[in-house]
Amino acid sequence: MGKKGLPSRSLAWLVFVGALIIVSGVSALRYVQQNQYRVPQSSDAPAIITVLPRHPLTGALLDAPLAVLPHVFGVMIENSADAWPLSGIDEAFLVIEAPVEGDIPRFLAFFSSEQDVQKIGPVRSARSYYLDWNAEFDGIYAHVGGSPEALRMITGRGVFDLDQFFQSEYYYRDELTRYAPHNVYTTMDDLKQSMREIDKKYHAAAPTYDSWIFTDGVSETSVHTVITLSWRKGYDVQWTYDPTTNVYDRSQGGKTYTANNVVIIETDVGTIPGDDKGRRTIRTLGEGRMKIFQNGHGNDLGGTWKKSSVRDRMRFYDNEGNEMVMNAGKTWIEVTDDLGNVVIEQMYGL
């Protein structure tokens, strides 16, 4: 199951498991420390601060910290017009949208093992840069084949791999309403079943990943803001802020998607030299300019994105170098080679 194997010697395995337990504890402590909600006290009350933990993936308030971090599934979902309307992506806690060949964007949608989603897809092929984002969660990576570079990377890194070409039991084809290659789907039940088999075969340790800092978002304006990101004709992205709900709405292919945070990052985008399909290269590490849209604001919330290593979470910083606090809920990250492709309009009287 997958391509992630065990060390050949028992001693090495024990050392490896011990290290994972230590790292897991550190990650859990970090997320509890960062994601806390301080309950206000009255002026007459003793100086005691009540701290409520937050979910490490969504920022939702919890009654108690999670004992074990939930597993994360990164699913490749296409965005060609032939795939619309998409299924399940509106339930992902995080979506990263980046270009592939032909200037058609593709999604990496992240789901938690705590979720129950009946239909996810259409699932499409892997690209190398999405693997760097998937690694932030040590995610189980669901896809249908992939570029030569991505497949080499999956093998070389030992990714928990769910390739439909070899593990078709976790996918199905919708032959009634779609045609290939736009008809491959999966479900959370299928993905969870794959995790059970991974646990049984490899005794996989609990995942380790860091969390963002979260808060509860509150609308700070009555103005409707429209954010447009240019891709190519028919695929431009448009998010519209609704101050009555404090969410950003996106309509596409007959469905509406919502986000509590919309982040647009600028990075280097190129074409793989000699690739006959025109496949892309995208720089995922280092840092670059970005815009983040929360609570109706965006023009004044520029800053920098940073990702130091493959396993590190991508984080966002304001112009003073402070890590930005994310609204609890869903986040969409848009990837572009030029923030000049972003147009922001404020719409009054809607």
Image (spheres, rainbow, N blue to C red):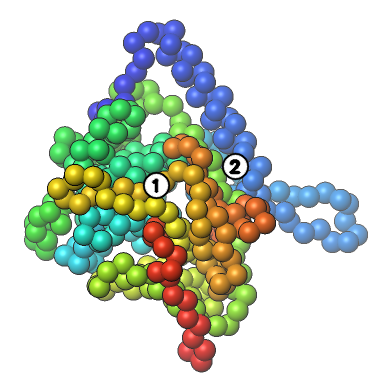
Cβ–Cβ under 8 Å for marks 2 and 1: no
Residue at the image point whose x is 30% and y is 57% from the top? 99
Q: Is residue 239 visible?
A: no
- Above or below, comparing residue 149 to residue 284 in the picture: above
- State which quarter of the image contains the N terminus: top left
Q: Which residue is mark 2?
A: 31
- Above or below, comparing residue 73 to residue 18 in the picture: below
Q: Is residue 157 visible?
A: yes
Residue at the image point whose x is 44% and y is 58% from the top? 266
For label 1, count other residues whose C-alpha is less than 10 Å away and answer few (under 14), some (14-19) or many (20+): some
Residue 113: where, in percent of width, then height? 39, 43
- Above or below, comparing residue 51 to residue 228 in the picture: above
Q: Which residue is mark 1?
A: 283
Compute the Cα span from label 2 to label 1: 27 Å
Q: Is residue 223 left or right of residue 176?
A: right
Q: Where is residue 7, by image quadrant?
A: top left
What kind of residue is marked 2?
Tyr
Residue at the image point whose x is 64% and y is 46% from the top? 34
Residue at the image point whose x is 9% and y is 59% from the top? 179
- Closer to viewer: mark 2 or mark 1: 1
Residue 288: where, in percent of width, then height? 50, 53
Residue 50 vs residue 247, the one in the foreground: 247
What kind of residue is marked 1?
Arg
Label whose residue precedes the other's in the sequence (2 or 1): 2
Residue 88: where, in percent of width, then height? 31, 58
Query: Mark 1: which secondary structure?
Result: loop
